[in-house]
Amino acid sequence: MMMPGLSCKKTAQLISESFDRELVWYQRIFLKMHLLMCQVCNNSAKQINNLQQIYRHLSHPSEEDESVHLPLSTKQNIFDSLEKSET
Ligand SMILES: [Zn+2]
């Protein structure tokens, strides 16, 4: 579904980017606005937030490989379903 401001696809990208670095203030505002309006992305963000907690939990130096592989593939599934829902 199309929303003013961010598309669902862009929202997914921003959520993904927020894993790697701090978002700029206006990106966070657009992201928050979209999440308030869009139930689809809202649900995905909740799932991703859970993943982020799992991420932190797993991020022991000795388990580096697992902490990358498992959440990333799950993340990809969420983004794939987001892209499909946009059409
Ligand atoms: Zn959306």
Image (tube, rainbow, N blue to C red):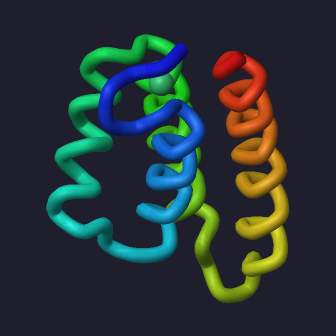
Up the image or down, 80 lies above or below 62; here it is above
Residue at the (18%, 57%) spot, across then down = 26
Up the image or down, 60 lies above or below 58; here it is below
Quarter placement of the N terminus: top right
Residue at the (50%, 74%) spot, across then down = 20
Left or right of 63 in this view: 14 = left
Up the image or down, 22 lies above or below 6; here it is below
Quadrant of the rendered structure where residue 59 is?
bottom right
Frontmost residue, 39 versus 46: 39
Quarter placement of the C terminus: top right
Residue 57: x percent and y percent?
Answer: 54, 60
Residue 35: x percent and y percent?
Answer: 33, 27
Residue at the (25%, 43%) spot, across then down = 30
Residue 16: x percent and y percent?
Answer: 55, 56
Residue sticking out furthest to the bottom: 61
Frontmost residue, 65 versus 75: 75
Residue at the (63%, 64%) spot, across then down = 58
Left or right of 37 in this view: 15 = right
